Image (spheres, grey):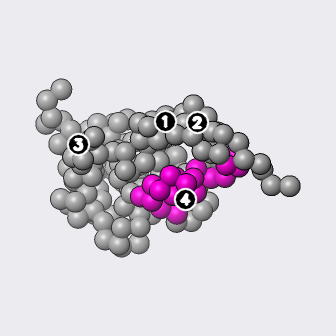
């Protein structure tokens, strides 16, 4: 017998959301299909490629692995929630554009979310730290050089902004 629908309330990109769905459904499916937030991509469906990376209560997680029932009262941030309210891109988003940290775009949202999590934890990472952190986000197109450059540029931009 499949899970019956249950009302689950959580915050997505600063807005409280209610969904009625099976609690075992992956948050990835709820974000894309129910809430129309298609920036988060499905890659491997087993939590190893990083395409579906989101922040849950500020922690980097794979949305393909997290059942929506575990999100009651929690906060989810997707790539769509990283820009300012006025639409200004975050330093990471802007650096990915400036440095060409993407090609086909499938992995880009997960890369940007993962880089955001890294810089929240380590605002001035070394190139080695960036490579180590980002190794959970697979990319078949860029060769990673431009991704590492983008993360380092975003880190530098964050240090230049007045507090």
In three-dimensional space, the C-alpha distance between marks 1 and 3, rounded to whole angstroms, equals: 19 Å
Q: Are marks 1 and 3 in contact (CB under 8 Å)?
A: no
Residue located 52% across and 63% down the image: 42
Residue that badge 3 annotates: 86
Residue that badge 4 annotates: 33
Residue 155 in sight here? no
- Precedes in sequence: disc 3 or disc 4: 4
Position of residue 34 measured from the top left corner of the image (x, y, whole percent): 55, 54
- Precedes in sequence: disc 1 or disc 3: 1
Element carrying mark 2? strand
Residue 39 in sight here? yes
Residue that badge 2 annotates: 9
Mark 3 burial class by Cα count in 10 Å: few <14, some 14-19, many 20+: few
Residue that badge 1 annotates: 16
Say whether residue 58 is left or right of residue 91. right
Position of residue 129 measured from the top left corner of the image (x, y, whole percent): 35, 46
- Precedes in sequence: disc 2 or disc 4: 2
In three-dimensional space, the C-alpha distance between marks 3 and 2, rounded to whole angstroms, equals: 26 Å
In three-dimensional space, the C-alpha distance between marks 4 and 1, rounded to whole angstroms, equals: 17 Å
In three-dimensional space, the C-alpha distance between marks 3 and 4, rounded to whole angstroms, equals: 25 Å
Mark 1 burial class by Cα count in 10 Å: few <14, some 14-19, many 20+: few
Q: Is residue 2 above or below residue 155?
A: below
Residue located 23% across and 64% down the image: 100
Residue located 37% across and 35% down the image: 121
Q: Are marks 1 and 2 in contact (CB under 8 Å)?
A: yes
In three-dimensional space, the C-alpha distance between marks 1 and 2, rounded to whole angstroms, equals: 7 Å
| Magenta span contains residue 83 | no
- Precedes in sequence: disc 3 or disc 2: 2
Say whether residue 95 is left or right of residue 77. left
In three-dimensional space, the C-alpha distance between marks 2 and 4, rounded to whole angstroms, equals: 16 Å
């Amino acid at each position: 017998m499949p899970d019956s629908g249950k009302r689950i309330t959580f915050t997505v990109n600063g807005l409280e959301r209610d969904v009625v769905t099976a609690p075992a459904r992956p948050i990835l499916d709820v974000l894309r299909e129910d809430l129309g937030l298609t920036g988060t991509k499905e890659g491997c469906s087993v939590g190893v490629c990083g395409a579906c990376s989101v922040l849950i209560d500020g922690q980097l997680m794979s949305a393909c692995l997290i059942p929506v029932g575990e999100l009651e009262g929690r906060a989810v941030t997707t790539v769509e929630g990283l820009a300012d309210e006025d639409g200004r891109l975050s330093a990471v988003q802007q650096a990915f554009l400036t440095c060409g940290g993407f090609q086909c775009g499938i992995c880009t949202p997960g890369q940007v979310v993962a880089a955001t999590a890294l810089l929240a934890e380590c605002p001035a990472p070394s190139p080695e730290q960036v490579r180590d952190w980002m190794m959970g986000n697979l990319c078949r197109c860029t060769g990673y050089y431009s991704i590492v450059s983008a993360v380092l540029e975003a880190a530098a931009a964050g240090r230049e902004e007045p507090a």
